[in-house]
């Protein structure tokens, strides 16, 4: 079973040539292979019957329920359609959470049995409830789970195996292409500002679309299109108004209206400082966009970012400060009253203006901190140590230190990063990673090459080697 957003035919064919059959895909579709989309997972392609299951449908543990809940809070609907969106939430209410989790796990167990799945593969770590229910179901059925993580270096990805809900001891080793370029600056293409069409061209195109929808009496399709445009442009009140018009998303609209109001009030209360006028040493802590896997899953025990900020607040020397910068892509979700008040309680924490240069902050800070953001690696490139709270891909590199109570942060900040050691460590880390692009958006790193069939087939061969090695390791 392969869970991926975009699946190429060449990947399926090459895996088959390596002796691995993809019997069903999740989300992404490809001709000739059964597929279950987000709507089918959420609503149930068919209702399971516990009597017909080969596995026991056990109630999720407290940890499993919390894992599911964090991801499922992302699930919402696009008004006027059956489409699922994973950015704003509001579809699953708190009183139905436990029942919904159990139902989705039961459905996942039935799917695993129906398709006689031997392994479940995720090209990104489960992070939106429905895929987490599938991973939980696989752990209950003792089916191995492969999770990949694309590195921000061209054509390299990491992987891990889960069995029974735990990472298999002793990572599977396989020989892949050596990396000898050391620590290189990253191409953060996914953080670039969105480019919009010139107004005249854009409005002409939209006018043609609107007229076409109206002429065919496709009112619902037009409403959904307007909602998406409002979300893209952050016209939140228009988006919420459209949600309120559709009876199926009306409760979601109420949830979003309250969240937007709380976020706006919280932003208005922030303590803003000018970093250029700061005379006290400070730690730079840029916030993660939410919801996303970096905070929800890789953040671990600090997935609620104010917990990390509070822990850091207690650990810094008395004359230090913590300066926060909001993520430029952040909307109002996950920025409610509890979030802002948790930070307001910390007297040695303040915010910088949203348009402050991140590179300037890295340069002026004595230390850079993050759950697992790329800013930590950028600090290392600048010769500055970083502190991480979650599970970043750069964990353990020279100069990168996992937070724990009692750390001497002053001593850490005064220890520059040895570039030669960093280069050797990055060479070792990337060399051990698999060859290929498991997450399709990273093909942007290889213009003209990344989308090629050859790259897709290389990825398939790497996945097959990892799978064969893992099965050998676990007997």
Image (cartoon, grey):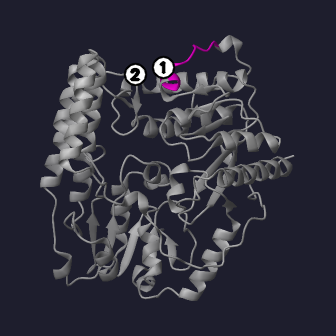
Q: Which residue appears at 41% of the width and 69% of the height?
A: 375
**Residue 405, quarter of picture:** bottom left
- Residue designated by label 2: 82
Q: Which residues are magenta?
A: 40-49
Mark 2 burial class by Cα count in 10 Å: few <14, some 14-19, many 20+: few
Q: Upstream in the sequence, badge 1 or badge 2?
A: 1
Tell me where residue 133 appears, x and y as whole percent.
Answer: 56, 32
Q: Nearer the viewer, residue 198 or 446?
A: 198
Residue 43's tag is 1
Query: Magenta part mainly helix, strand or loop?
Result: loop
Mark 2: secondary structure: loop
Q: Which residue appears at 62% of the width and 53% of the height?
A: 452
Query: In the image, is residue 30 part of the stretch drawn in magenta?
Result: no
Q: Nearer the viewer, residue 304 or 431?
A: 431
Tell me where residue 28 appears, x and y as whole percent.
Answer: 56, 35
Residue 213 seen by the camera:
yes
| CA distance for labels 1 and 2 | 10 Å
Q: Which residue appears at 44% of the width and 86% of the height?
A: 411
473 to 212, vertically: above or below: below
**Residue 287, quarter of picture:** bottom left
Q: Which residue appears at 81% of the width and 45% of the height?
A: 18
Circle nearer the viewer, 1 or 2: 2
Left or right: residue 355 versus residue 448 is: left
Left or right: residue 277 versus residue 361 is: left
């Amino acid at each position: 079973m392969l869970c991926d957003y975009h699946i190429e035919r060449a990947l399926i064919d090459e895996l088959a040539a390596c002796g691995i059959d993809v019997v069903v895909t999740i989300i992404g579709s490809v001709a000739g292979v059964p597929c279950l989309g987000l709507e089918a997972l959420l609503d149930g392609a068919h209702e399971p019957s516990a009597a017909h299951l080969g596995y026991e449908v056990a109630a999720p543990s407290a940890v499993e329920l919390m894992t599911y809940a964090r991801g499922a809070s992302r699930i919402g609907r696009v008004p006027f359609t059956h489409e699922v969106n994973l950015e704003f939430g509001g579809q699953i209410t708190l009183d139905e959470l436990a029942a919904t989790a159990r139902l989705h796990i039961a459905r996942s167990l039935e799917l695993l049995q129906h398709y006689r799945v031997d392994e479940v593969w995720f090209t990104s770590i489960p992070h939106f409830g429905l895929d987490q229910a599938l991973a939980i179901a696989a752990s209950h059925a003792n089916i191995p789970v492969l999770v990949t993580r694309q590195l921000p270096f061209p054509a390299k990805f990491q992987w891990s195996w889960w069995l029974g809900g735990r990472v298999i001891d002793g990572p599977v080793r396989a020989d892949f292409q050596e990396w000898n370029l050391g620590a290189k600056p990253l191409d953060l293409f996914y953080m670039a500002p969105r480019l919009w069409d010139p107004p005249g061209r854009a409005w002409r195109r939209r006018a043609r679309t609107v007229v076409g929808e109206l002429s065919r009496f496709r009112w619902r399709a037009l409403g959904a299109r307007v909602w998406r445009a409002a979300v893209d442009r952050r016209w939140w009140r228009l988006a919420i108004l459209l949600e309120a018009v559709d009876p199926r998303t009306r409760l979601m609209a109420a949830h979003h209206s309250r969240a937007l109001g709380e976020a706006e009030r919280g932003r208005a209360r922030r303590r803003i400082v000018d970093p250029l006028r700061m005379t006290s040493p400070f730690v730079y802590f840029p916030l993660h966009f939410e919801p996303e896997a970096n905070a929800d899953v890789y953040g671990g025990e600090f997935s609620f970012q104010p917990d990390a900020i509070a822990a850091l607040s207690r650990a810094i020397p008395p004359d230090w400060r913590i300066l926060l910068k909001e993520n430029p892509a952040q909307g109002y979700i996950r920025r409610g009253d509890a979030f802002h008040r948790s930070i307001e309680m910390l007297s040695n924490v303040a915010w910088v203006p949203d348009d402050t240069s991140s590179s300037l902050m890295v340069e002026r800070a004595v230390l850079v901190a993050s759950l697992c953001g790329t800013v930590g690696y950028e600090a290392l490139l600048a010769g500055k140590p970083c502190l991480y709270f979650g599970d970043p891909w750069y964990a353990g590199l020279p100069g990168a230190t996992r937070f724990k109570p009692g750390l001497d942060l002053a001593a850490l900040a005064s220890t520059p990063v040895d570039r030669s050691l960093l280069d050797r460590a990055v060479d070792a880390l990337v060399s051990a990673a698999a060859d290929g692009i498991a997450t399709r958006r990273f093909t942007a790193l290889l213009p003209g090459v990344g989308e090629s069939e050859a790259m897709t087939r290389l990825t398939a061969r790497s996945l097959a080697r990892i799978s064969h090695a893992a099965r050998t390791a676990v007997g």
